[in-house]
Image (cartoon, grey):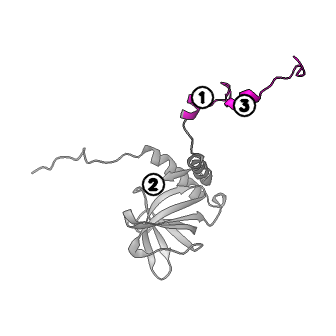
Amino acid sequence: MAGKGNVIDLTARLRKGNKSKKEQPSALASAAPVLDMTERRQEILQSERRIAKRTILTEFLGAFIVVPQKGLVKANLYDISDTGVSFDVDFENGELILSQEVSVRFYLSQSSYFSFDVVIANIRAIAGEGVIRHGGTFANALESDPALTHFIRFIEHVSQQLRVDRGDLVAPRVK
C-alpha cells in the first residue's frame, strides 16, 4: 500500500477492454423488434382527421347534384356525417371545383325531393371505379336544418339494419 492509499488502479482493466455484464448489451435487447412509429402516427392522424362519425353508404342511396351548365347529374352517395357528405360522379360528368357550392337533391318520388347545399372541399379520382369522389361540408349548420339532421340520423339507423337481397326468395314462375 505504498503511495496509493485507497485508490483502485483501473488502467490494467481499461487496457484489456473488459466490460462488466451490466455494460454488455444483452442478446435479448438486440433481438427486440424495432417499432416504426411513422405507421402508428399516421393511424392516429387519420383517426383525428375525421371529427364526426360517418356512415358509409356505398350503393345504398342515390342522389342528384345540380351542376351549372349541365343541370341534374346523377351522384352516388358514398358517406354522410354531421359535418358533410361525399359522393361519386362518373368520369364523363367531370369534376366540380374546390370551394364550389352545389345543391344535392334526394328524390323521394319522381317529382318530390329535398335538398341541401354542400361546399366542395375534396376531389379525387377513383380510377378503379371510374368515378370522381367529391367530399364537401354542409353549407348551413345542422342546427338550422332539422330535416337534414333527421335524415342523417335515419340513414345511420337504417344502414345498421341493411341486408343484401341475393334473390333467394324469388317465387317460381307459373307456366
* Residue type for callout 1: Ser
The correct choice, above or below, for 93 with respect to 168 in the image is: below
Residue topped by disc 3: 14
**Residue 122 falls in which quadrant of the image?**
bottom right
| Residue 166 shown left or right of residue 175 in the figure | right
Q: Earlier in the sequence, mark 2 or mark 3?
A: 3
Nearer-N-terminus badge (1/3): 3
**Which residue does the image show at 80% across and 25% down from the upper left?**
9
- The local secondary structure at tag 2 comes to loop
| Residue type at tag 3 | Leu
Q: In the rendered image, which residue does mark 1 sit on?
A: 26
- Viewed as shown, does residue 4 lie left or right of 36? right
- Looking at the rendered structure, which numbered label has been put on residue 104? none
Dominant secondary structure, magenta = loop
Q: In whole angstroms, how far apart are the C-alphas of marks 2 and 3?
A: 70 Å
Q: SS of the residue at dot 1? A: loop
Other residues around mark 3 within 10 Å, as few (<14) / some (14–19) / many (≥20): few
Q: Which x, y percent locates residue 153?
A: 55, 50
Q: Which residues are magenta?
A: 1-30
Measuring from the top left, give residue 171's x and y in whole percent. Answer: 20, 46
Q: Which mark is residue 57?
A: 2
